[in-house]
Image (tube, rainbow, N blue to C red):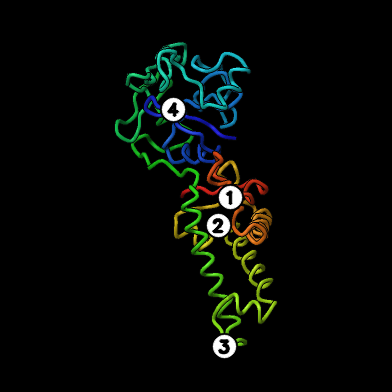
């Protein structure tokens, strides 16, 4: 599930649910920050969302008024709260007890929710120091990762491919001392290709299902593999993803990566099948 959030009067997202949870843990988001997802008719603070342990509440004005508008909003982005401008929500969004809060509008009205540069401002919902998520608002980290673009993934794949080819060359070179070319070696010894695919499968599956959540190439480019909610893949699922990746790479001559350039979650073909994606750390 993907969410949009408001920060300093600006609509941000979409981001996986796992990222929202991580930001709440770190203090980047506080329970009073407003979130929205497809199917909601307006913005709600985190503290009132049952998905994040809240009590549930009435959605604030500023979102689509019915389900048809909610579907339309999902296609084009989160709900826009001000009819006069595209970038914010109406200053009439309520705080607790119906008091207005000053979430920023399209013309830069002050935000009631603090950020890295301006601290926490009172929204009428209580100070975030009482937050069950802990960290005081002064300790703002940088915003966590977003989806990796295709160029970062291509660079990581190039590093991984060089490492795998080097490993296979080292393993088979003693048997074939007259050649150092991988294609020539594969012609002389047909076992090289299946061995290479098996090694690549275990390499990707085991490393990306480990606590590292990444191959060496992805680590070098600051990437990690997650499910669609931003969580670590279970080992079995990571192995399935690794197998799909290697087989599809062989069948399509790496064209299986192309969809990552065009879809919103930057998923390659094997990611679509496995329900995974790659995020920047």
Q: Residue at x 32, y 21 (%)?
A: 108
Nearer to us: label 2 or label 3: 3
Compute the Cα span from label 4 to label 3. 61 Å
Res. 211 mark: 2
Compute the Cα span from label 3 to label 1. 44 Å
Contact, mark 1 vs mark 4 (Cβ under 8 Å): no
Sooner in the amino-acid sequence: mark 1 or mark 4: 4
Compute the Cα span from label 1 to label 4. 27 Å
Sooner in the amino-acid sequence: mark 2 or mark 3: 3
Nearer to us: label 3 or label 1: 3
Nearer to us: label 1 or label 4: 4
The residue pinned by badge 4 equals 11
The residue pinned by badge 1 equals 232
Sooner in the amino-acid sequence: mark 2 or mark 4: 4
Nearer to us: label 2 or label 4: 4
Instruction: Say whether residue 199 is left or right of residue 34.
Output: right
């Amino acid at each position: 599930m993907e969410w949009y959030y408001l920060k300093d009067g600006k609509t941000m997202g979409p981001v996986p649910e796992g990222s929202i949870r991580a930001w709440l843990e770190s203090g980047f988001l506080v329970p009073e920050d407003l979130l929205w997802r497809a199917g909601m008719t307006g913005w709600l603070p985190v503290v009132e969302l049952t998905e994040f342990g809240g009590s549930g509440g009435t959605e604030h004005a500023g979102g689509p008024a019915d389900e048809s508008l909610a579907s339309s909003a999902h296609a084009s982005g989160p709900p826009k709260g001000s009819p006069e401008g595209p970038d914010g929500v109406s200053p009439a969004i309520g705080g607790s007890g119906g008091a207005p809060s000053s979430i920023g509008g399209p013309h830069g009205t002050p935000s009631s929710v603090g950020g890295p540069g301006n601290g926490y401002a009172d929204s009428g919902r209580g100070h975030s120091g009482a937050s069950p998520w802990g960290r005081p608002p002064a300790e703002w980290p940088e915003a966590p990762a977003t989806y990796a673009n295709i160029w970062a993934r291509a660079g990581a794949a190039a590093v991984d491919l060089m490492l795998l080819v080097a490993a296979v060359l080292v393993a088979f070179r003693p048997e074939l001392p007259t050649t150092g070319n991988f294609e020539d070696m594969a012609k002389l010894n047909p076992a090289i290709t299946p061995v290479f695919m098996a090694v690549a499968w275990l390499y990707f599956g085991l490393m990306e299902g480990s606590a590292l959540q990444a191959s060496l190439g992805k680590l070098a480019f600051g990437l990690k593999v997650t499910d669609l909610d931003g969580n670590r893949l279970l080992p079995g699922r990571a192995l399935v993803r690794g197998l799909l990746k290697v087989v599809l790479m062989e069948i399509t001559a790496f064209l299986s990566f192309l969809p990552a350039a065009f879809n919103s979650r930057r998923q390659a073909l094997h990611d679509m099948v496995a329900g995974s994606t790659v995020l920047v750390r």
